[in-house]
Image (spheres, rainbow, N blue to C red):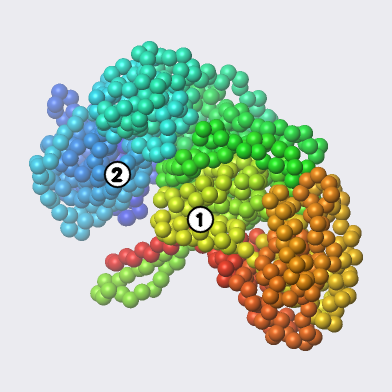
Amino acid sequence: MKIAVIGQSLFGQEVYCRLREEGHEVVGVFTVPDKDGKADPLGLQAEQDGVPVFKFPRWRAKGRALPDVVAQYQALGAELNVLPFCSQFIPMEVISAPRHGSIIYHPSLLPRHRGASAINWTLIHGDKKGGFTIFWADDGLDTGDLLLQKECEVLPDDTVSSLYNRFLFPEGVKGMVQAVKLIAEGKAPRLPQPEEGATYEGIQRKETARIDWDQPAEAIHNWIRGNDKVPGAWTEACGQKLTFFNSTLSTAGLEPEGEDLPIPGAHRPGVITKAGLILFGNDGRMGRMGASACPPRGSPGALMALPSQLLVKNIQLEDGKMIPAAHFFEKVESSALELTEEELGTAEAVRGAWKRILPSVPEVDESTDFFKSGAASVDVVRLVEEVKELCDGLELENEDVYMATTFGDFIQLLVRRLRGGDKETECAIDYVEKAVNKLTLRMPHQLFIGGTFVDAEGGKTYETINPTDGSALCQVSLAQVSDVDKAVAAAKDAFENGLWGKISARDRGRLLYRLAELMEQHQEELATIEALDAGAVYTLALKTHVGMSIQTFRYFAGWCDKIQGSTIPINQARPNRNLTMTRREPIGVCGIIIPWNYPLMMLSWKTAACLAAGNTVVIKPAQVTPLTALKFAELTLKAGIPKGVVNVLPGSGSLVGQRLSDHPDVRKIGFTGSTEVGKHIMKSCALSNVKKVSLELGGKSPLLIFADCDLGKAVQMGMSSVFFNKGENCIAAGRLFVEDSIHDQFVRRVVEEVGKMKIGNPLDRDTNHGPQNHLAHLQKLLEYCQRGVEEGATLVCGGKQVPRPGFFFEPTVFTDVQDHMFIAREESFGPIMIISRFADGDVDAVLTRANATEFGLASGVFTRDINKALYVSDKLEAGTVFVNTYNKTDVAAPFGGFKQSGFGKDLGEAALNEYLRVKTVTFEY
């Protein structure tokens, strides 16, 4: 079909391209004249394709069609006019000329919101449903017969841009192409528009966009979002006109604590908080009381009960500068970053992009203003995309362009993002500094909620102790139930409304790679903190605690863009056909509760998979070892992971862990710890909202050493199986079964090796064995050994506290341990080797003894007989079986237990399934 396209913008360009792809002949394109030397995208594309382009400044004069314009149009012989988006008045002589007439796209569900600014009014009126209409043009204003309509849900925080980009643009293009196809096939309907429910609202202009404060908070929110970007909802406050952007009703967990912003006509003053500007409607009974003039900084105002409220994240000042609302009372940062040679090169490349977008500007200098130089909203999108291409995939938001409108400010913002964070965030961290291990440690010690380090509710703190000497390292904020609610609200908002859910899977992986790189850059600092806070031997912490954490994030970063569903053949609904596919989707807000033995590594095992899957997370580190988790939180900021995606709450399990398990907005709990607590968490998860749960619990891992083994290796690995990380190891061999003929020799060689172990300061490079994690655990180990002696086991060596400051415990060996004894059945979680004999050649009997436990986390076997190794590994009831090795875990190999050692997997591809849900989608066609 021969088509004339009349319109403009990227939308018009996309419709034009799709029509040509469908085989239609576009005989001419009619668009607006060039502005400031810039051609409209539709006209530019058509010129490149060799299609005739007409740029009439007007079609009519004094209400009459211009004859020469109509003649040029008629000479093309169009059979249909397609108007995808047109701001000009087209005379009826053109509208009615083609054989099939003219069709127009309108971004509302007609007859509602006829006229201009239809998307704005959809939001201003709080419509729950939006959509678009394609109708047959007539001589009225959006009154023609209906051809096609499609609707969508309007989300509570949708703006003009989000609604347009999510539905009206992509589906509108498809709708225009579908409408033309129906016309070509002779199947296009003409349904008269009903007059019932018809509305007409005029174009929104700046002078009419002033906020009326005498209405509920939701109506104010709708007014702000309906005017977002153009023309901008405004009010007067503090002696100037302020325009508000990026409004949300998602204020769960936000307290109106900050500085009052009195607004004439408002029922309550606004409050500038760390999250932005909180505003109140007239539907709240009580609120914050404030003065009638702009208060000095630090003025608290009197806090009363919360009214209905909304949050505004950006404010445009009267001079046109856009700032984060949270920074309204702050002085503008005066010190500019000094750029490196590489960054100067990037700046010049970006300057070139500005020149391409702003061709009418002779020279782009530091003071060149993007918008005052003629840029429009479509140019914002183009600039963001050009920066992404020039800067290795860096994701800016449209908001960033509006907040840094001059070239100099834009480059400063860009470089801060390229450096992995912003200066203000770094400066806001209250560090505890310690000079140790030839380093100056800078350790955050507050809660990390919504991208900010904050004090706990009521300023509550506790001491974290250095197990090497029993001294206090620092005061750490102690999270309360209300802090959990705030963190979950921040994570929920980041998941549902934030950038994290909008970026591509590949960009998510890029952020996790960057986080891994930062962890590697800070590995000595992280390992030193592990030594101080957990008693980890520094060299082991460097290799395992920190080294494997880095590997874990790198591994799962690679998985981000490989999480795929499948297509499934199903029975066809004849005569139609069906297609079924599955999608693997993130769950939402996850709670991760980690133990104290590997504070950073256990965090990484779970958090890396959780984030790779696209979730957000609230992490509860063990109360006795919070510091590497808080340092990790700081590194997520530097990596550019959006605020709210990661939250860290040091505190007690009974408060923080329990609230996470009970919270209705948490959809998954990942826990590593004792079986007793795991059962309690599982019950809470079931009773609260049937949240998904994975548990890595206690163990009593058997290690079977046969007489035909390599004895030297068995001794070496047997030592490691028990004493690795001071025995504070979930898969530690809780009981060694040694074949009778080599039992005495094995014990003698183990005792010799134990005597060579150096017990000492974990920061000393020659230390093999550091302090136990905390005092209560040391006391538990002493009681454990005492009970073993009382029940008749032979204490060969150790069993006592080392006579020195700190929580040191001697490596211990018990023999003659019988199956009924307490130490044969229960886990010590310490450096205690439990050795039992078994009769030569009696494989099945020792397997029965090894499996006679409710635990099934790990196990091991040493033998040179491959048949025996295969048989034993098949019969052992454990999630991991090591053969002629031990403790050999890897980020690619799934890890998890059987029986009362829990269920679910960490590491490997299997771990992703713990943080994903599968959705089945079936089509009929």
Q: Which of 564 and 443 is in front in this view?
A: 443
Q: What residue is drawn where x is 71% and y is 68%?
A: 823
Mark 2 nearby-residue class (10 Å; few <14, some 14–19, many ≥20) = some
Q: Is residue 378 left or right of residue 595?
A: left
**As displayed, is residue 66 above or below residue 580?**
above
Q: Nearer the viewer, residue 332 or 726?
A: 726
Instruction: Tell me the quarter of the picture where residue 293 sits.
Output: top left
Instruction: Tell me the quarter of the picture where residue 627 sits.
Output: top right
Q: Is residue 904 left or right of residue 182?
A: right
Q: Which residue lies furthest to the bottom in this view?
A: 841
Q: Disc 1 designates what residue? A: 669
Q: What residue is drawn where x is 34% and y is 40%?
A: 158
Percent coordinates x, y for residue 410 in the rendering: 53, 27
Mark 1 nearby-residue class (10 Å; few <14, some 14–19, many ≥20) = many
Tag 1: residue type? Ile
Mark 1: secondary structure = strand
| Residue 154: assigned label | 2
| Marks 1, 2: nearer the viewer | 1
Tag 2: residue type? Val
Q: How far apart are marks 1 and 2 (CA)?
A: 31 Å
Percent coordinates x, y for residue 279 in the rendering: 35, 27
